[in-house]
Image (cartoon, grey):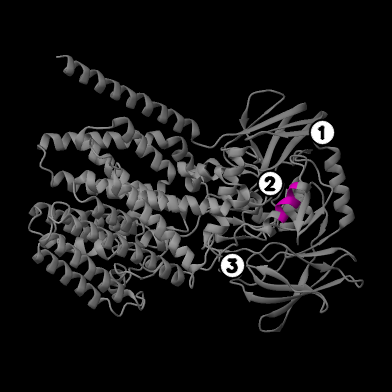
């Protein structure tokens, strides 16, 4: 009876080694979930984890909104594009298996699983490309799964790890195309990974295409079969891309409408630093490409040019591919190509995993058939030693780099030579496999520990894991909420995405897809922002609370309540040709429909460098607000009051913008003297419109008027809003939701039309006495994407049916 054998042991072992190595690194570092230290480097804590929390809410029916729309962030924004950019991987759905309070644990598990799947996919690809020892495929697969790019650049950007899995899977699609197998599965694989993360899928697709070309050039198939394989693959890619378009097209359209950020400036890293990243225990996030693939993979790849047992055309083609791809990272035109011709502001070498994959495949091709000869081993060793010598002064090396390289390399050479000369001894092969797998596991984990330690000196944690504080705040927000009667703003004290992290509905929203129109509207109304306008922040201001129906607000751990108008109100139609507001306060008054501020003239006086005073006359007892969006510093009224912060401390007006700031009450003499400490300001202070004095009594009267003219009932669906107006309502129905592309509205069941706009909000012109309005949102490009995907399904199904019928006819004949 034949012995049972584990199918594809290389994939299981590679995945296990990668997963264990990543977890061991966390244990040694004491990061969550193995210790108290947060692992939320950079955007992980402030963007991705909150979006995962929102996905949990959507999947469990606890969100305000659905897959198409998010009522909670930015006063209401589309969600499908955010889903496509950050959460599109099928693995993201695993978040529902965890309690919401364990959202950080869910993201950690998903991240670990992605690393394991990337390792397993690479190991499976290697043995599909060429049969060979399963344990060596496992070692190389694990080396890819925990490559320098994965640990240094992508472990805290979970969506990028989908590209790490996509590359070997797309290479498998290329293999299937050459072998005329799995047409439906191939199309599905392409579609899934382009939905998962189009950014890294784009890079993976280019890389897989280059690898397929090399495979075709080095294949022993007839040229006609090679050409048919390429054509089949091209058709598969087209159909797979079409399958992804219900998400892909809305992502592209939304991105085109997003708040722009300037392109980064690419300066190639020095060759010494570039090549040093091939060695273990090196770190250089944002400064160089993460090219580390483990000593075993590096040494075996270096043997390929010298390995006479491998066909010359294979040696030459793969060596040239590795050299040219590496060079493309350092030449601006090709560097731009890898990044979709948009040089990033952050990490400049996001394509690093591409070269890691090529090195791992080259290593496999050198060792799959037989152990490299001593000449090949000697040549590869000389190449690696030369590399170590030439990069010994790189600032990216750590103290143990050369030691680990020497020990791992020496062990691998000893095992390979032992197998070569005692290859018939089963015990030698087993012991060698155990030693190499164990040594590489230790090296990969050690490198991950060092990388995480060194990187955190540059990029510190952005948020703490969910704990008692978050639970307490979320409970308070939930208890205070009564959506859609009014909004409950949780603020942005923990992250810019607190509305989806803690619950509630507010302006807080951090996304690369934040609409430019929303940023423009919020800026006009006095809201602050960060990240080139892609992270909107809270504004504690009673006028904007009234405009956006914020009836409850979380402030310093307590709930503050206010009487506000309903989400939909009816206002007189503005007169044609009315002048544009000339200050933040005038913008607020336009949407409020009443004058509640005095905007006085003021004079400035310089006390000392960096300290000025602004003096203005205001009604006694009025609340004084300061609008200096391009200034960073502090302000106050009176020496006994507390300094309050203006946040624009980093490239104000470009990367950051300060919110309108409440600085205090006008004293009894009616003269408001604002002391201003200026830390940074790229322009001179404005000569008018910077000070507004709010009359609380006028505001109360204005709110009462809006409540009297407001909707009697408001209901929201997943991506729609319905309002019942008071009988006989005429004029302009204003919905306290930003007017972004995709909104269509109708009155009393009439024909839906594109929503109008008033001060940046949705506005519906009432043609006469009206009672009901309905507005619905559909992401721009969704219809076209659904049509393209439907066509892809029909064509793929037709081709698969045709192939099946043809095979049956051939079998019958």
In the image, residue 701 lies at what x, y percent?
A: 88, 48
**Which image quadrant: the N terminus?**
top left
Label ID, residue 759? 2
Residue 480 appears in view: yes
Residue on which disc 3 sits: 652
Mark 1 and mark 2 residues within 8 Å of each other at the beta carbon? no
Query: Looking at the image, is mark 3 or mark 2 earlier in the sequence?
Result: 3
In the image, residue 30 lies at what x, y percent?
A: 52, 67
Residue drawn at x 16%, y 72% is: 382
Residue drawn at x 28%, y 57% is: 139
Q: Secondary structure at mark 2?
A: loop
Residue on which disc 1 sits: 712
Residue drawn at x 45%, y 39% is: 249
Query: Looking at the image, is mark 1 or mark 2 earlier in the sequence?
Result: 1
Residue drawn at x 25%, y 63% is: 296
Q: Is residue 85 left or right of residue 778?
A: left
First to last magenta residue range: 472-478
The answer to which image quadrant residue 813 occupies is: top left
């Amino acid at each position: 009876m034949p012995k049972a054998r584990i199918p594809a042991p290389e994939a299981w072992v590679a995945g296990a080694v990668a997963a264990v190595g990543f977890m061991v690194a966390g244990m040694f570092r004491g990061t969550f979930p193995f210790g108290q230290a947060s692992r939320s480097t950079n955007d992980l804590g402030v963007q991705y984890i909150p979006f995962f929390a929102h996905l949990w809410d959507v999947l469990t029916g606890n969100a305000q909104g659905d897959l198409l729309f998010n009522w909670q962030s930015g006063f209401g924004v589309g969600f499908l594009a955010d889903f496509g950019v950050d959460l599109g991987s099928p693995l993201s759905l695993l978040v529902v298996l965890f309690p919401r309070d364990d959202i950080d644990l869910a993201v950690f598990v998903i991240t670990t699983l992605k690393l394991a799947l990337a390792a397993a996919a690479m190991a499976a690809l290697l043995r599909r490309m060429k049969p060979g020892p399963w344990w060596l495929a496992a070692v190389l697969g694990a080396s890819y799964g925990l490559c320098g790019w994965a640990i240094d650049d992508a472990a805290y950007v979970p969506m990028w790890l989908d590209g790490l899995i996509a590359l070997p899977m797309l290479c498998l699609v290329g293999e299937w195309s050459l072998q005329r197998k799995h047409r439906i599965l191939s199309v599905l694989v392409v579609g899934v990974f382009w939905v998962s993360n189009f950014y890294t899928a784009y890079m993976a697709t280019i890389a897989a295409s280059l690898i397929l070309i090399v495979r075709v050039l080095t294949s022993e198939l007839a040229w006609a079969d090679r050409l048919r394989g390429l054509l089949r693959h091209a058709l598969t890619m087209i159909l797979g891309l079409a399958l992804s378009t219900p998400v892909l097209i809305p992502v592209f359209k939304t991105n085109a409408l997003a708040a722009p950020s300037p392109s980064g400036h690419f300066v190639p890293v020095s060759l010494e630093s570039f090549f040093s990243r091939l060695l273990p225990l090196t770190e250089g996030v944002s400064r160089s490409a993460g090219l580390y693939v483990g000593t075993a993979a590096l040494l075996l790849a270096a043997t390929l040019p010298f390995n006479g047992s491998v066909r010359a055309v294979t040696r030459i083609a793969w060596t040239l591919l590795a050299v040219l791809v590496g060079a493309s990272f350092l030449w601006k035109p090709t560097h731009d190509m890898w990044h979709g011709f948009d040089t990033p502001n952050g990490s400049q070498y996001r394509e690093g995993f591409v070269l890691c994959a090529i090195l791992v495949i080259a290593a496999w091709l050198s060792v799959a058939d037989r152990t490299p000869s001593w000449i090949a081993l000697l040549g590869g060793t000389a190449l690696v030693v030369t590399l170590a010598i030439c990069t010994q002064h790189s600032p990216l090396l750590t103290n143990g780099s050369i030691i680990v390289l020497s020990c791992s390399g020496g062990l691998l050479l000893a095992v390979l030579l032992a197998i070569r000369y005692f290859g018939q001894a089963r015990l030698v092969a087993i012991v060698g496999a155990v030693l190499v797998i164990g040594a590489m596991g230790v090296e990969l984990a050690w490198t991950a520990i060092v990388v995480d330690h060194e990187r955190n000196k540059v990029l510190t944690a952005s948020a703490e894991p969910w704990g008692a504080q978050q639970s307490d705040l979320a409970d308070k927000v939930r208890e205070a909420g009564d959506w859609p009667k009014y909004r409950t703003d949780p603020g942005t004290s923990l992250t810019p995405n607190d509305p989806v992290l803690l619950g509630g509905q507010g302006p807080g929203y951090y996304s690369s897809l934040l609409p430019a129109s929303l940023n423009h509207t919020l800026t006009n109304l006095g809201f602050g922002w960060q990240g080139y306008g892609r992270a909107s922040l809270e504004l504690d201001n009673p006028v904007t609370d009234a405009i956006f129906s914020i009836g409850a607000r979380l402030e310093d751990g307590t709930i503050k309540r206010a009487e506000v108008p309903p989400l939909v109100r009816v206002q007189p139609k503005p007169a044609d040709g009315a002048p544009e507001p000339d200050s933040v306060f005038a913008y607020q008054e336009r949407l409020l429909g009443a004058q509640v501020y005095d905007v006085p003239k003021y004079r400035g006086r310089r006390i000392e460098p960096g300290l000025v005073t602004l003096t203005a006359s205001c009604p006694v007892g009025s609340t004084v607000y300061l609008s200096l969006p391009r200034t960073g510093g502090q302000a106050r009224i009176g020496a006994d009051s507390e300094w309050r912060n203006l946040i624009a401390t980093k490239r104000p007006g470009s990367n950051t913008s300060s919110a309108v700031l409440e600085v205090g009450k006008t004293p009894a003499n009616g003269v408001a003297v604002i002391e201003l400490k200026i830390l940074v300001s790229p322009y001179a202070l404005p000569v008018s419109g910077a000070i507004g004095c709010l009359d609380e009594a006028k505001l109360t009267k204005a709110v009462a008027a809006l409540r009297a003219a407001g909707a009697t009932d408001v209901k929201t669906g997943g991506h729609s809003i319905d309002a019942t107006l008071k009988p006989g309502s005429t004029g302009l129905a204003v919905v306290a939701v930003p007017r972004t592309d995709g909104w269509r509205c109708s009155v009393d069941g009439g024909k839906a039309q594109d929503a109008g706009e008033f001060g940046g909000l949705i506005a519906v012109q009432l043609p006469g006495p009206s009672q009901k309005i309905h507005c619905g949102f559909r992401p721009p490009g969704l219809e076209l994407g659904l049509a393209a995907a439907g066509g892809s399904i029909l064509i793929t199904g037709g081709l698969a049916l045709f192939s099946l019928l043809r095979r049956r006819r051939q079998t019958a004949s």
